Amino acid sequence: MRQTQLFTKTRKEAPSDEVSKNAELLIRAGFIHKELPGVYAYLPLGLRVIENIKQVIREELDTVGCQELIMTALQSKEKWEASNRWSDEVVDNWFKTKLKNDTELGLAFTHEEPIADIMKQYVSSYKDLPFFAYQFQTKFRNELRAKSGIMRGREFNMKDLYSFHTTKEKHLEFYELMKDVYMKIFTRLGLGDKTYLTMSNGQPFSKYSFEFQTLSEAGEDIIMYDKEKKIAINKQDYSEEMFEDFGFKKEDFNFEEGKSIEIGDIYTLGTKYSEALDLTYTDEDGKNIPVFMGSYGIGITRVMGTIVEVYNDENGIIWPESVAPYQVHLVSLCREEGDIKKADEIYEKLTAQGVEVLYDDRADVRPGQKFADSDLIGIPKRIIVSPKTLEQNSLEVKMRNEEESNLVKIDEL
Amino acid sequence: MRQTQLFTKTRKEAPSDEVSKNAELLIRAGFIHKELPGVYAYLPLGLRVIENIKQVIREELDTVGCQELIMTALQSKEKWEASNRWSDEVVDNWFKTKLKNDTELGLAFTHEEPIADIMKQYVSSYKDLPFFAYQFQTKFRNELRAKSGIMRGREFNMKDLYSFHTTKEKHLEFYELMKDVYMKIFTRLGLGDKTYLTMSNGQPFSKYSFEFQTLSEAGEDIIMYDKEKKIAINKQDYSEEMFEDFGFKKEDFNFEEGKSIEIGDIYTLGTKYSEALDLTYTDEDGKNIPVFMGSYGIGITRVMGTIVEVYNDENGIIWPESVAPYQVHLVSLCREEGDIKKADEIYEKLTAQGVEVLYDDRADVRPGQKFADSDLIGIPKRIIVSPKTLEQNSLEVKMRNEEESNLVKIDEL
């Protein structure tokens, strides 16, 4: 992508009402646009990051046999009344709206009810189970406050996966598998080191559940984490009883405390929703039994915000390679026609090789501004082409997270 | 994908309240689920079709320099009041909702206002123009009736593209280009033959505009079309004046009439929204001038519905290759372990070659049912592997839209 064609530009300042670091940097770098507090549009650079995050998750979920679908935002109240989640007194973050004939509708904040309802069409016998279905879907949550940038949105993208098994035992096998799959996903997204499998209160679904918490000063949670054992407890849920129930001894752990962001959660739902929505199967003996369900979330936009919170410095964002909007930021300082042609050729060649390149081909911008923009945007690898480097048939290569740069021969690139 | 793992199954009947052919077939074949009238979930097979349609469009738009972003459903009223489109008396299909503090919000049915507002950040000089930005986004329209299946949704996916130019002349060049790009897109989607560039009333944006109308008995419009000249007029907008304005003589045309579905439209917006939202640029002389805008829509889910309306027979759907959920439906009639192993190998081999295969590996389903399911699902190429074909080291290949099948040696596949 030529930067002269990209419609976004960097900005010196974010909107004055933007208090979160992630949104401030993402707005200044041209990744997102604030529509309303907690409601952000994703501009070309931002959408590329979102799609990269989704693709990593999609690959890992498909590998273990999950199937992608997409459900709807608009919801009729019957299904949610069945599970007692329609009332605004029970669920305090519904957005509600109405059809022309005054029928009330809700905008889904999650999808346990509709997916249980869909599956009634497809599950009759134990032979139809298990299966696992997920979506990347826009969720709506009427949050009272939204001051965490893209980390707590009123409209945001979420991956939600639902599992359907005959028995709790079979569910728990899959649940254990998902712990590993999630950690693999977060590791690929660059958050592995700072992310802890975290024991927490499982309400309203079960006594306990697990969250994935990423250490960050921007976090709204506090975890007690053991670096070596790579496990944590959500501090607000900590109790002696929890330790006993998990068969742990407190003296075996070396806990530190830190603020953290919940980027994923995995729930054992049991038969709460299958019973409410009448999703049953017939077992080998012809008996009707409610399906055993689980749900597994990852906030896509929250992950993106977390990555920015974790990977930045005073000059801007530092994207991990797996999610960066482009792999290479080719910055041209060329002014003469012959040099510009050579820079263009390098861009074409890299692109033809399948390298994703953002090419700063702007003619009227000073080098200092170009480097500042490049730092702010945060593409992991910067390649500078200038009259000086071309004299030596070379390019200057600098990683965003390193100070030093290297001259590399053009032919070796 | 092994059919034993796919959670959907075919159904004998669609819901009794489903009156449209497209939704009936898509529900029976397991592509979609009806959540509410005009509100459909897309199940794994359906989502694959949607993504294929989007990918064709994305490729053609990116080729001419368009940039993808994604805006938000939630909208604050200020921007829409500026253009006089907030009031329910002016726009009769808003879904409205509220924040906790009672601030009214709308769910976007289109995005001229928010994109003009976003672009104020990025446009100051004539040097910043032109550019073209598009999204695939979920639109909400509070339709009074929704009886056309996925062709007229209350919640549906739409590609909307917006163009930004300095002058009308430059806009019109791009507008002409988009006519070709759209026709190329619809041709790739298998709708080229039946789709006509259609002159129509351009209200509320301009005197005239162009629609893309696909001939189909399921259509809600009527067009007068000239097969040879490959042009049409929306009958309700036909007038002598229109002909004169376009410099056409009626006697030069050989019009037939037919029902049709509007699958795309391209509008010259002019400066209506840039003036309302104060999106201006400075020209060479330092003068402040409103940006000249255009908008270009394609209903993704409507295109999918149209394809089903156009391509079906009494047995089911007949997908064009470019959008089919899978390229090959491998149907195994094998019962013996050795044969099943061979069928599995063929599936693995095709998949390893990058062929997208749906593999009917169901053991407990009769051949007749398998063929009926395969016809209903409508994958273009069916490959049958059976004890009989294996005896001859062969497979039986049959195209969905042909009667005859051929034996092909396994090695030649």
Image: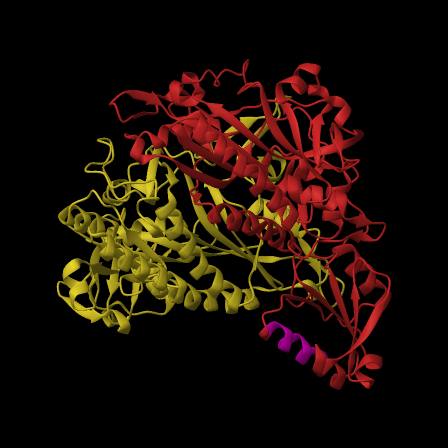
Chain colours: A red, B yellow
Q: Position of residue B313 (x, y in %)?
A: 17, 53
With B117 as the anchor, is B182 left or right in this view? left
With B227 as the anchor, is A261 left or right in this view? right
Q: Position of residue A158 (x, y in %)?
A: 56, 38
Query: Magenta part of the protein: which range?
Result: A343-351
> Which quadrant of the rendered structure holds the N terminus of chain A?
bottom right
Q: Nearer the viewer, residue A78 or A16?
A: A78
With B161 as the anchor, is B381 left or right in this view? left
Residue A348 covered by magenta stretch:
yes
Does residue A197 sit above or below B65 in this rendering? above
Q: Position of residue B360 (x, y in %)?
A: 26, 51
At 40% from the left and 56% from the top, the residue drawn is B53
> Which quadrant of the rendered structure holds the C terminus of chain A?
bottom right
At 33% from the left and 21% from the top, the residue drawn is A289
Does residue B172 sit above or below A317 in this rendering? below
Quarter of the figure with residue A95: top right
At 54% from the left and 46% from the top, the residue drawn is B111
Q: Position of residue B319 (x, y in %)?
A: 28, 57
Does residue B252 sit above or below A8 in this rendering? below
Residue B50 covered by magenta stretch:
no
